[in-house]
């Protein structure tokens, strides 16, 4: 079960984000002022090694993981990774608050059998009590389920790097957890605010809504920077590598703003608006006070300002170095201005300093 991998009070873990195009990893230490970035790594993956968050080429991922391990401090022994995509399901259910732990677990298994579209023998399940409603005497339970082979592939990837797997998390919740590193970018440090954290990956955009520091909603969409890259490639006859470099550097023909950038921005805006509406319909949080962008495509020219104008709320690019994260000069130079790529990995590494919480 997933509960086998969600453990309380573990030693410092390397947070490993296995994406479509690359593996990103960080190692954090807790300090009196916040957190220290002790190790960071970013290793590219061959195309097709990971598709829709499923590992298709275990050998290629294992090779990348070994490179990640070489770039981490030798003292690092434990790892945390995450699952996402169509094989992962999370749902809040309501149970009788008077049930014992054993009764609660038995009842949740019964509930899970009716909610999960896979045989339970093929699924890892975990759950956590969130809060109790004193008026109804009901407790809110966050149920998480994932295909076992998806969990096992992450465990195998960590093993390939010589890292003992202590946590396999859900990516949306790892992203929401990373908010504590960037909350200080907001005027009130997020207190009393509803904030959307949007990770713009290559093929999937992950959305986590954080209210008063708690993740209250997550969603994934099959949309990302890959669409932008493919448009550049098609319009200007570049190779894939040239298109990726041009996307980041902005070294493109003058009319690309109208031919490529504007259509991509419009699509992303539609995706974000749709997710905000779904969040408003499924939770008590009808409006968001701000958005924070992260991931490889967050730095696309003019993206944050366009979204801010269209949505009518402040939009920031994640920079935990403004917030509660510190690093020595050498590591800061290695990361450069791309720290926003590592927010999911940071959220995973933060599990080192939290007790049993999804």
Image: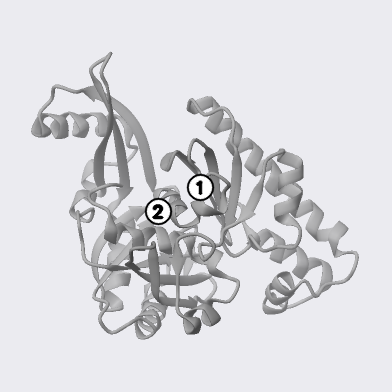
> Which residue position is annotated with label 2?
174
Residue 237 spot, x, y in % from top left:
81, 74
Q: Secondary structure at mark 1?
A: loop
Residue 164 spot, x, y in % from top left:
22, 70
Q: Is residue 106 above or below residue 23?
A: above
Residue 103 spot, x, y in % from top left:
11, 29
Residue 150 spot, x, y in % from top left:
34, 57
Of the numbered discs 2 and 1, the one sitting upstream in the chain is 2
Q: Looking at the image, can residue 55 be seen? A: no
- Density class for disc 2 (Cα within 10 Å; few <14, some 14-19, many ≥20) is many
Left or right: 334 as drawn, with respect to 28: right
Which of 165 and 52 lies nearest the eye of the viewer? 165
Which of 3 and 290 lies nearest the eye of the viewer? 290
Q: Is residue 321 above or below residue 1?
A: below
Q: CA distance from mark 2 to mark 1?
A: 19 Å
Q: Tell me, for residue 189, which label it has, or none.
A: 1
Q: Quadrant of residue 165?
A: bottom left
Tell me the residue at 48%/27% (across/down).
Answer: 283
Asked if the residue at tag 1 contacts the one at tag 2, i.e. Cβ–Cβ closer than 8 Å, the answer is no
Q: Tell me, for residue 274, which label it has, or none.
A: none
Q: Secondary structure at mark 2?
A: helix
Tell me the residue at 31%/28% (across/down).
Answer: 93
- Density class for disc 1 (Cα within 10 Å; few <14, some 14-19, many ≥20) is some
């Amino acid at each position: 079960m997933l509960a086998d991998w969600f453990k309380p009070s573990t030693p410092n873990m390397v947070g490993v984000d296995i994406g479509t195009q690359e593996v990103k990893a960080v190692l954090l230490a807790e300090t009196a002022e916040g957190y220290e970035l002790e190790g960071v790594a970013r290793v590219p993956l061959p195309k097709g090694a990971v598709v829709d968050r499923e590992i298709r080429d275990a050998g290629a991922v294992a090779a990348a993981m070994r490179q990640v391990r070489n770039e981490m401090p030798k003292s690092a022994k434990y790892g945390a990774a995450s699952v996402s995509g169509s094989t992962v399901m999370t749902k809040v259910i309501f149970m009788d608050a008077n049930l014992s732990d054993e009764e609660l677990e038995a009842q949740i298994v019964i509930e899970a059998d009716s909610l999960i579209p896979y045989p339970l023998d093929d699924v890892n399940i975990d759950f956590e009590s969130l809060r109790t409603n004193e008026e109804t005497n009901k407790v809110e339970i966050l149920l998480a389920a994932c295909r076992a082979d998806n969990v096992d592939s992450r465990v195998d990837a960590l093993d390939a790097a010589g890292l003992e797997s202590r946590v396999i998390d859900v990516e949306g919740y790892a992203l929401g957890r990373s908010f504590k590193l960037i909350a200080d970018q907001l005027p009130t440090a997020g207190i009393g605010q509803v904030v959307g954290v949007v990770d713009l990956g290559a093929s999937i955009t992950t959305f986590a809504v954080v209210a008063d520091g708690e993740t209250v909603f997550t969603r994934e969409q099959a949309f990302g920077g890959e669409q932008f890259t493919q448009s550049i490639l098609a319009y200007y006859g570049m190779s894939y590598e040239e298109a990726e470099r041009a996307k980041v550097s902005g070294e493109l023909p003058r009319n690309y703003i109208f031919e490529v950038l504007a259509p991509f921005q419009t699509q992303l805006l539609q995706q974000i608006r749709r997710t905000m509406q779904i969040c408003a319909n499924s939770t008590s949080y009808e409006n968001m006070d701000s958005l924070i962008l992260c991931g490889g495509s967050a730095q696309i020219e003019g993206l944050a300002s366009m979204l801010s104008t269209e949505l009518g709320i402040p939009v920031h690019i994640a920079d935990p170095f403004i917030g509660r994260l510190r690093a020595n000069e050498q590591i800061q130079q290695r990361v450069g201005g791309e720290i926003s790529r590592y927010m999911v990995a940071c959220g995973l590494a933060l599990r080192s300093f939290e007790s049993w919480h999804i």
